[in-house]
Structure formats: C-alpha cells, structure tokens
Amino acid sequence: MAISSVGPLPGSSVGPLAGSPNILFIMSDDHAAHAISSYGSKINQTPNLDRIANEGIRFDSTFCTNSICAPSRAAILTGTYNHINGVTTLDTPLDNSLWTFPMALQSAGYSTAMIGKWHLGHGPNADPAGFDFWRILPGQGHYLNPVMLEGAPPGSTYGPRVVERGGYVTDLITDDCIEWMAAQSGVSDQAGPWALFCHHKAPHRTWEPSAKHFTMYEDVEIPYPDTFYDDLDGRAEVVQAVKMRMMDLDPVTDLKATVPPGLTETEEINWRYQRYIKDYLRCVASIDDNVGRMLNWLDETGQAENTIVVYTSDQGFFLGDHGWFDKRLMYEESLQMPFLLRYPNGVTKPGSSNSEVITNVDFAPTLLELAGVQGPPTIQGRSFAPMLTGEIPPDWPTSMYYRYWMHRDRAHLCPAHYGVRTKTHKLICYYNHPLDQPGANGPADEMEWELFDLVADPLETNNIWGQAEVAAIQSELLAELQQLQDQVGDEPFRRNA
Ligand SMILES: [Ca+2]
C-alpha cells in the first residue's frame, strides 16, 4: 500500500479538516511493555490493550529519550529532545509558549482536550496550552478522590478552577474522556475532528488499586523476573548504588503493610516484591478495563471507524528486573515504551508488528502526518506513519540517543548518563555530574562506562566495556554516540567545561 494512503481518511466532505481522523491518545504513567500481554507479559493479562494490538500494529522497539515523567511528556508534545525543550528533569516545567503538536492540531481545526496527568508544571507559563478543554491532576495527583484543575473557558479572565472529585482516578479520567468525546460528536455537521489526550496517573508509585481490584491476585504468586536476584556484578559502581531495590521500598507508603517478623533477607525481598507487583498490576488492570470502556464507546457510537487509537506510556519500569523498581536507567525495561496504534479503515494489517527503532520525539510528526497537518522544521523527530502499512522510510535511523540528567536524584540516587542503543548493542556513559540541573545533586562521581551485547546478553547482566575482544564495536559505538550528539545538538560532557 502506498504511503499516500496513510493520512486523512477518504469519504468525508465536511469540517475544516475534511477526512482527518479523530485521535484518541491514551498514555499511562510508568506502564512497562512487559506488563502488557500482547508484549509477552509473563505476569498479567491485558485483553483490552491487546485488542488495540490485535486490530492494529504493535511497535516493539519504541524508546524514550529520557526515562522520567516530565521530560518524556515534553519530548512527546514538542517532538524535540530535552536539551532543546528545556525539560531535562522533574524540576523543569514546560514553557507553554513552545510549539506542541496539540497546538498544531488545534490551529488546523481539531477540537483538542487534555484530561488526566499533565505533570509539566502549573501557572500562567506552564498550564496546558493548545487545548480547547483541559482538566488535569495537580502534580502527581491522588488515586482516590482526587482534586483536579480545570482550565478557564476561552475568553475568560480568571484562572483554573479546582474540581473536587469522588472516586478512583482511572475511572474518573475515563468518565471525563467519554463525556468530552460524546460532546464532540454530533454537535454540528460542520464540526471538525477531535484529538483527546487521555493521560492516566496509574500505575505510578505508590500503586494504589481501585476497590474493584483490591483482591485480584490474592491467592497467587506472581512469577519473578529472570534477573530478580541479579547481584549487579560488573556493572558501574553508580548503578550498583541506586536506591531502587526491593529493600528501598517504604513498607508504609509503598507496600501498605508491616514487614512480617522472622523472615530471612531473601524471604523479605520476595515478600516485598509480591506486595509491590500485585498493587502495580491491579492498577494496570483498572487501566485495561477503562481502555475497554473507551473502545466499546467508540464502537457503540460508530466513531471507531474514524478514530486513531494510540496506547503508550511515558516510559517503562523495572518490575523486579535486576532486583529493582522504578525507571531512569537506560536498561531495556526502563527504556522501552509500549506503543500500540489502531488506524481505522484497515490501513494497518491487524495484529502486525514493527521492530524499527523509534523514539518519543517521533510521536508528534507521526500523528501530525496522520492528521494531514504540517509541523514546523524545528521538530527533531521523524514521522513513522509509513510503517503503519509496513513500509520502512529510507535512511530510517538504526540507533537512538538517550540522556538522563537528574544526577543523584534524592529518592533513587540515580546517576546522570547518556548513551546510544543500536539494534544489537548499548553503550552507556555515566558521566556522573549534576551540571547545575534543577533536581540534580552532587557530589559528582568518576565517569564510568557500560557496554552490552543485546543479542548475546539481552538481559544486560554482562558489562563488556573495555574488553579487548570488543574493541572494534566499542570504537564504533563511541563514534555513533558522538555522531548522534552532533545530530541532535547536545554537548558531550567535559569535566572541566
Ligand atoms: Ca512516568
């Protein structure tokens, strides 16, 4: 099928953007691909998310360029890397005068809405922009009975109003999304398409399930990941020091229970994992249920035939992998984002998959192309829309650049690093310096390196940096890292800079 068949839908003749599809962009927070059954999860089932994959396309090598909430959201909205958009850490709000792709959709005639977790700052310079309607959680928000902030109607002079909600956050966000979608359909024959950003808070720490899922998995033992007892031998010292182990979970706030007395250390680590992973998966189950509600609503109202559905997460998460929870590090479980896309009218081959390297800066140009809207040349990502029909654009990148800036963040002590991932290898430079970044802390540590052969060692337990037999590939990867930094305009770390 030709590339030109991907884009606005044929057949419609009304509205400012005749034939452009609606876009339902669903993004959860910290939902790792390996907790989705269509990605081969060994620990849960997600039948409704699987529906998107089964009726659309699953992207298997989608990576975030900085594995924490705010930076990934900024990269998605602006189509740029964090050194360009300024959202390098959790303490750097998004300047809402910067171009975003929802703004472009709105300018082109789309009705736009942002509902759920924003996490890019608040106030006149950071509130959501480019949306006809927004109702967001303040900061991280709460799982139960959350307060939400709602943007003032266009033309009004007062600021956001506080909306007090009763219920469970994933249900409430979904309720609001369905209500907003319903309000868009049939208002007028002249109505244009809509783009809805449904941003779930779940399954972010502290993993609080809804009452419906309280007892799910009660009588089962969740399997342990292959690397659960990884001793991290041979990995960078700063990696061995991160505070992301099961023993770093807070019994009160994270595990909601007192550690049973008399356990051996291994028994306690196992107990902690079960407490943690069950609540995480219960939160995921609620997302899956609620995605099902939205898919059913699209079916029942006939909107499925002209609506693109995307499911993704702002980054991955360690689900006991290497003995960890959380994200931040460039290891696979944290680096990979789920990305499922269903395009109406059978453009995508149902149940297809793609393993090309794509990143979160590619989302904006892709969705704009599907909407038939032109973006500015300042976008750093590339559209992978042709891949929906199985076509790989010429010269498509075979590697990606990553950078985590928030050195020694207070909660996890995760080191600042950057690196390159190719289809076969990963090179990571822990430059270990706060560089005056907001939210980063000293002291700086000595630079360290890791190199993984992802074919021979997909679980990343064997650091081969500096070994004589890999000198050639190591040189190639160092050159690739430099080339990518040049290309995206980022500066390599220099100790005396
Ligand atoms: Ca996140």
Image (tube, rainbow, N blue to C red):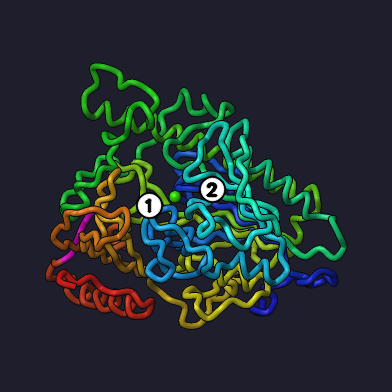
Check the picture and name the quadrant holding the C terminus. Answer: bottom left
The tag on residue 344 is none
Please provide the residue range marked out in magenta: 460-465
- Give the image quarter of residue 157: bottom right
Horizontal side, residue 18 vs residue 67: left or right? right
User: In this rendering, is residue 196 above or below 262?
Assistant: below
Query: Which element carries disc 1, helix, strand or loop?
Result: helix
Residue at image x 48%, y 37%?
Answer: 281
The tag on residue 117 is 2
Check the picture and name the quadrant holding the N terminus. Answer: bottom right
Which residue lies under the disc numbered 1? 333
Query: How many residues crowd mark 1 within 10 Å: few (<14), some (14–19), many (20+)?
Result: many
Residue at image x 61%, y 35%?
Answer: 164
- What's under tag 1, amino acid-wise? Glu
- What's under tag 2, amino acid-wise? Lys
Tell me where residue 7 appears, x and y as whole percent: 68, 73
